Amino acid sequence: MENEWESRGESIKKIYKGLKDIHELLIKANRINGSLERYTAVKNEIEQHGWAAICAKYHPDVNLDDPAAFELFEFYRYVYSRIENKH
């Protein structure tokens, strides 16, 4: 029975190591393609100006002539939700 638990423990350690490696690769990929910088810039803008100012500037209803407004605002909303969940 003890060997079975040791074997399971080793399997879990291998899985955890694999997930950690994947996490590190994703962070590296995000750095390479600029996603981390964009996320950080958006986060700083939200923290500096506040959510109401972001909505006034980027909300799709305010930017009806911009076809990318919805996707951009969704990204701001995602970053904002991450900030709010930390508080």
Image: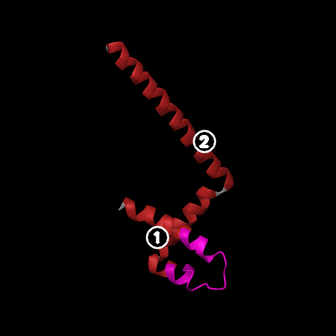
**Residue contact between numbered discs 2 and 1, judged by CB atoms under 8 Å:** no
The residue shown at (55%, 61%) is: 40
Image side of residue 7 versus residue 67, left or right: left
Dividing the image into 4 quarters, which one contains the C terminus? bottom left
Q: Residue 9: percent from the left, percent from the top?
A: 39, 23
Residue under label 1? 47
Q: Quadrant of residue 38?
A: bottom right
The residue nearer to you, when weighing 54 against 45, is 54
**Residue 86 position within the rendered picture, expressed as x and y whole percent measured from the top left:** 38, 59
Q: Secondary structure at mark 1?
A: helix
Task: Based on the picture, tell me whether residue 57 belongs to the magenta stretch.
Answer: yes
Residue at the left extreme, as displayed: 1
Return the residue nearer the eye: 17 or 64: 64
Residue 67 image position (x, y, % from top left)? 67, 78
Tell me which numbered mark, 2 or 1, is placed earlier along the sequence. Answer: 2
In the rendered image, the quadrant that contains the N terminus is top left
Q: Would you name the residue on which mark 2 appears?
A: 25
Please determine whether, in this image, residue 14 is positioned above or below residue 3: below
Q: CA distance from mark 2 to mark 1?
A: 28 Å
Q: Please tell me whether mark 2 sits on a helix, a strand or a loop.
A: helix
Residues in magenta? 55-74
Amino acid at circle 1:
Glu
Q: Say whether residue 13 is left or right of residue 75.
A: left
Q: Is residue 33 above or below residue 46?
A: above
Which residue occupies 44% across, 61% down? 82
